[in-house]
Image: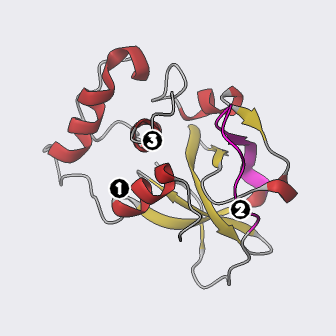
């Protein structure tokens, strides 16, 4: 979309990026982690079998010069990053943080239906995809500090099943 922030355009451009099968690692995903470094990620990241949704979000934001959260690899650390958005003020590119068994998940808002947010994110089925994630699991809606919120909520149809675990 022409009004999408640059970081969301960067995220959409990565749709289809996948983890490597078995014990191998995706050079692309490990490259994102290497460019972000341990200062941003909070850990030495060396295997795409480790959840990488936070790596994806941080990398896309940095492509637009937006400073990611410290400990970006930990999805729930994004719940205090930037500024809070009310659900009725969401716009494409908002960072959404979700609860899930065994941890959290983070991705970018692209739209919603009555039951779920449509999220472009990494590590969704071991790839960068757009998934439907239940609104009830959302624990934070965030926007980069100092950046104007552009856009408004986008209503989409519910064509795919709701994701139950993004790990």
Q: Is residue 137 magenta?
A: yes
Residue 42 seen in the current view:
no
Residue beneath disc 2 = 151
Residue drawn at 42 percent across, 20 percent down:
40
Identify residue for label 1.
126
- State the image quarter where residue 88 is shown: bottom right
Q: Which residues are magenta?
A: 136-153
Report which residue position mark 3 lands on: 64
> Could you say where residue 24 lies in the image, as x and y percent from the top left?
13, 44
How far apart marks 3 and 1 lie (CA) works out to 24 Å
Q: Which residue lies at the image location 33% right of the left edge and 59% below the top edge? A: 14
Q: Residues within 10 Å of mark 1 (few under 14, many from 20)?
A: many
Residue 105 placement (x, y as % from top left): 56, 44
Q: Is residue 151 above or below residue 143?
A: below
- Would residue 57 appear left or right of 118 to someone viewing this image? left
Q: Marks 2 and 3: in contact by CB < 8 Å? A: no
User: Residue 127: image x %, image y %?
Assistant: 35, 58
Compare residues 102 and 16 and report the one nearer the observer.
16
Q: Earlier in the sequence, mark 3 or mark 1?
A: 3
Discs 3/1, front: 3
């Amino acid at each position: 979309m022409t009004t999408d922030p640059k970081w969301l355009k960067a995220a959409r451009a990565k749709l289809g990026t996948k983890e490597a099968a078995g014990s191998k690692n995706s050079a692309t995903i490990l490259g994102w982690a290497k460019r972000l470094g341990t200062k941003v990620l909070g850990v030495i990241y060396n295997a795409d079998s480790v959840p990488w949704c936070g790596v994806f979000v941080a990398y896309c934001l940095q492509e637009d010069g937006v400073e990611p959260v410290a400990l970006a690899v930990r999805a729930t650390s994004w719940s205090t990053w930037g500024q809070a958005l009310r659900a009725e003020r969401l716009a494409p590119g908002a960072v959404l943080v979700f609860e899930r068994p065994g941890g959290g998940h983070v991705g970018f808002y692209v739209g919603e239906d009555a039951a779920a947010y449509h999220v472009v994110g990494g590590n969704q089925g071991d790839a960068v995809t757009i998934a439907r994630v239940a609104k009830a699991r959302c624990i934070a809606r965030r926007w980069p500090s100092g950046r104007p919120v552009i856009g408004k909520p986008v209503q989409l149809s519910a064509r795919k099943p709701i994701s139950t675990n993004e790990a």
